Amino acid sequence: MGDKIITGGCDGFIKVWNYEDIDQAEGDDDSNFYLTPLETYELPKKDGKPARILNLLKINEEYWLIQDGLGRFFKFSFDQKIKPEIIFESNSGGLADMCHSRVHNSSVTIGEDGYVRLWNYAEKK
């Protein structure tokens, strides 16, 4: 992505920002400044609710692993021809945090239910 900053929010949108625009932005008298992202992507909603993007992790040059606070993991590409794919969906409800292994196809999650779980998203268990 070069000199870009990538953000994800509780509105379900992934946004790509130009680093130089942020670095050189000047605020108004209240230190507010407004920028327009270079690119915007929306993850699929769940039961009408927007995805709550908690983590974005680059897997390789093409794909990212996205953690959704609604209990889903997405395989995501910035190539708009490739739709975001739900590679795993937890049946335990929302997630508060996640730590992904770069060696194994697994993540440890902390659920809003208070449980810590190890997920192998390649085997979907």
Image: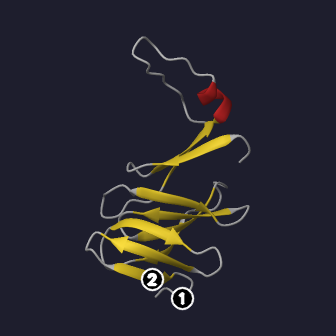
Give the residue at mark 2: 118
Residue at image position (31%, 57%) is 49
Outermost residue toward the top? 29
CB-based contact (under 8 Å), mark 1 and mark 2: no
Image height check: is 123 above or below 7? below
Q: Nearer the viewer, residue 95 or 63?
A: 95
Please state which of residues 12 and 4 is positioned toward the viewer in this rendering: 4
Q: How is the image coloured?
A: secondary structure
Expressed as whole percent of the image width and height from the top left, the position of residue 13 reads: 47, 49
Q: Residues within 10 Å of mark 2 (few under 14, many from 20)?
A: some
Amino acid of disc 2: Leu
- Image coordinates for residue 60, horizontal then vertical, percent: 71, 65
Instruction: Give the percent coordinates (x, y) of residue 79.
Output: 67, 55
Does residue 37 appear in the picture of this structure? yes
Q: Nearer the viewer, mark 1 or mark 2?
A: 2
Q: Which mark is residue 114?
A: none
**Label 1 or label 2, whichever comes before in sequence order:** 2
| Disc 1/disc 2 C-alpha distance (Å) | 12 Å
Could you tell me which secondary element the residue under label 1 belongs to?
loop
| Image: 26 above or below 119 | above
Residue 119's spot in the image, x, y percent? 47, 82
Res 14 visible: no
Q: Nearer the viewer, residue 64 or 115?
A: 115
**What kind of element bears circle 2?**
strand
Q: Amino acid at mark 1?
A: Glu
Which of the labelled discs sits on residue 123, or is there none? 1
What residue lies at 54% left-to-right and 88% top-to-bottom? 123
